[in-house]
Image: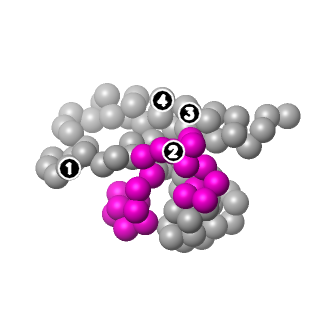
Amino acid sequence: MPSLVDYIIYTFIKIDDSLNKILEEYDRPLRARGFKPKLSDSEVITMELIGELFGIDSTVGIWRYFNKHWTHLFPNLSSRSQFAKQ
């Protein structure tokens, strides 16, 4: 049985691969202006999905959970407000 770390990494890889395939077919940049976010879209989607699977139903709660337990997997996790904006 895979560990929770393995599951999070596997989920990220699947999301990242799928998102990259979708964006290859998209004919314009996802963001037109502004600073590039520290977290990739795949990282944010992974954290949101895992958080929801664990029954965490708010962006603040998901940020708190990952900030407390998984910063070694998501070292670019910044402030809660930046996470919520992305």
Per the image, the residue denoted by label 1 is 35
Dot 3 or dot 1, earlier in sequence: 3
Secondary structure of the residue carrying tag 4 is helix
The residue shown at (47%, 34%) is 16
Determine if the magenta segment contains residue 67. yes
- From mark 1 to mark 4, how far is it between C-alphas? 23 Å
Q: Position of residue 60 (x, y in %)?
A: 51, 70
The residue shown at (61%, 36%) is 9
Residue flagged by tag 2: what amino acid is it?
Phe
- From mark 3 to mark 1, how far is it between C-alphas? 26 Å
Per the image, the residue denoted by label 3 is 14
Per the image, the residue denoted by label 2 is 74
Q: Position of residue 45 (x, y in %)?
A: 48, 49
- From mark 3 to mark 4, how far is it between C-alphas? 5 Å
Per the image, the residue denoted by label 4 is 17
The 10 Å Cα crowd at callout 4, few under 14, some 14 to 19, many 20 or more, is: few
**CB under 8 Å between discs 3 and 4:** yes
Dot 1 or dot 2, earlier in sequence: 1
The 10 Å Cα crowd at callout 1, few under 14, some 14 to 19, many 20 or more, is: few
- Total marks drawn? 4
Toward the viewer: 76 or 33? 76
